[in-house]
Amino acid sequence: MPLSVETPPGSMSVVPSEEGVTAAILSFNRPQTLDHVLSVLHELPLEEVIVVDTSHGDDCLQVGRTHGARVIALDDIGVAARNVSVREARTELVMLLDDDSYPLPGTTERLRAAFEERPRLGVVGGYVHQPLAEGESDGMVHAFDWFLDGRDAGMRSGAPAVFFPEGACMVRRSAFLEVGGFFAPGFLTVTELDLATRLIGCGWDVRYVRDARFHHLVSQEGRTPSPRSHRYKVRNEIWYFWLRFPRGLAVRRILAYLAFDLIEALYRGFPGAWLGGVADAWRQRDSIAGHRAPLPRAALRRAEMDRGRRHLRLLALVARVWLRRRLRGKNLRMAATERYGR
């Protein structure tokens, strides 16, 4: 429950308007980037802006007030904070943002058009652009687009997708609430995949529109996964397959993705995070007790699409990058030996 909601009482019982779009921002102790995002949103066709802050401070809340946003203070409940913002929204369409992401001009209208064309569209994600570091290209794996590229050419309402970037998307409020929103025990990572699967299981569509662009003010240290996020990822993938898949298929998927995640953990240098995620999935199993609800095979085929093959491609790409780095390091050592004799 919110610690405080600066909005007139009764908003939860009001039928949301079919007109307009609400922008709902999840904020955590980044007042500078939040101020930038809110400044951009002033120029966009939005009915209202909601800032949900979970940092237990007043800086972000004050920034939100200064820009005329409705502000909500919460405990740090992770992605479940987005559920509160969607419930509080006064419009049927809600754009979910982070405090360091915002839609570029034309994106709001583009996503609204997708919903108008598809009455059973539950959520649609856009292309997440972020500044590139030295040596990176726009098609590298850090972008959400890598898993979804090339599918929506010429498609007004986008292409079928298996997930969406949770801080760069638009949801239909009624569909979101019907399936229960983000799975609260997940807290962080894989939660958008779980929500997409449950939407599909209830007959809602999940799509991706590449020309709906969002900008991400990512920091250099935020470019690669942290041990903490990898630990959540390992735990949540185990839970995801166990909760949504038939038992035999769940076991096979869990083993396959654990192998993939172990390789990633070894590559990034934090195998302890992998072990911790596996342990957490077991130790914290009581938090998901009673939530197991496997989907029909047909729904799972749509929810999975080519996700497994994409992960194999990603594994091959990581292996090539690792090999190039090893060879480059070996060549540098050989050159140093030839030049300096050591």
Image (cartoon, rainbow, N blue to C red):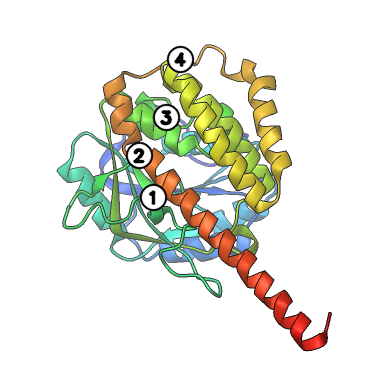
Q: Which mark is residue 247?
A: 4
Q: How crowded is mark 2: few (under 14 residues within 10 Å), some or many (20 or more)?
A: many
Which image quarter holds the C terminus?
A: bottom right
Q: Distance between the residues labelled 3 and 4?
A: 38 Å
Looking at the rendered structure, the secondary structure element under dot 4 is: helix
| Precedes in sequence: disc 2 or disc 4 | 2
Mark closer to the observer (3, 2): 2
Q: What residue does disc 1 label?
A: 147
Q: How far apart are marks 3 and 1 (CA)?
A: 36 Å
Which image quarter holds the N terminus?
A: top right
Q: What residue does disc 3 label?
A: 12
Q: How far apart are marks 1 and 4 (CA)?
A: 26 Å
Against 220, residue 111 (above or below) is above
Looking at the rendered structure, the secondary structure element under dot 3 is: helix
Q: Distance between the residues labelled 2 and 4?
A: 21 Å
Q: Distance between the residues labelled 1 and 2?
A: 9 Å
Mark 1 in CB contact with mark 2 (< 8 angstroms): yes
